[in-house]
Amino acid sequence: MQWVKNGFFDHLDKFANSLGYENFPVALHLAMVPWESPEDRDMFILTITGNEVQGGDSTNFNVMG
């Protein structure tokens, strides 16, 4: 498995980490939105949380664990 920028798991990672895992159902639904770009998604997260986007990227993605 490889990291796919602007893909479902990228979105899910950013929403779950930014909104908190207690809000996972909301994060899951927001991850399914066909975001135009990661920047649009990140601006949305910043707008609703007031905080910088949290989550991983291709440099720290490790499918094995």
Image: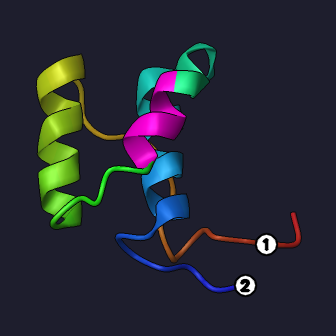
| Quadrant holding the C terminus | bottom right
Q: Please name the residue shown 44% across and 70% down the image.
A: 7
Q: x, y percentage for residue 43? A: 12, 43
| Quadrant holding the N terminus | bottom right
List the residue tagged with mark 2.
Answer: 1
Which residue is at the far right?
64
- 30 magenta-colored: yes
Secondary element at tag 2: loop
Q: Please name the residue shown 64% across and 70% down the image.
A: 61
Cα–Cα span, label 2 and label 1: 7 Å
The answer to whether 56 is drawn above or below residue 57 in the figure is above
- 7 magenta-colored: no
Disc nearer the start of the sequence (2/1): 2
**Which mark, residue 35?**
none
Q: x, y percentage for residue 3? A: 56, 79
Q: Please name the residue shown 28% across and 60% down the image.
A: 34
> In the rendered structure, which amino acid carries the disc numbered 1?
Val
Question: Can residue 17 be seen in this snapshot?
Answer: no
The majority secondary structure of the magenta stretch comes to helix
Magenta part of the protein: which range? 26-31
**Neighbourhood count class around disc 1 (C-alpha, 10 Å): few under 14, some 14–19, many 20 upward:** few
Residue 21 placement, left or right of 28:
right
**Which mark, residue 63?**
1
Question: Can residue 63 be seen in this snapshot?
Answer: yes
The answer to whether 36 is drawn above or below residue 32 in the figure is below
Q: x, y percentage for residue 46? A: 17, 32
Secondary element at tag 1: loop
Residue 63 placement, left or right of 58:
right
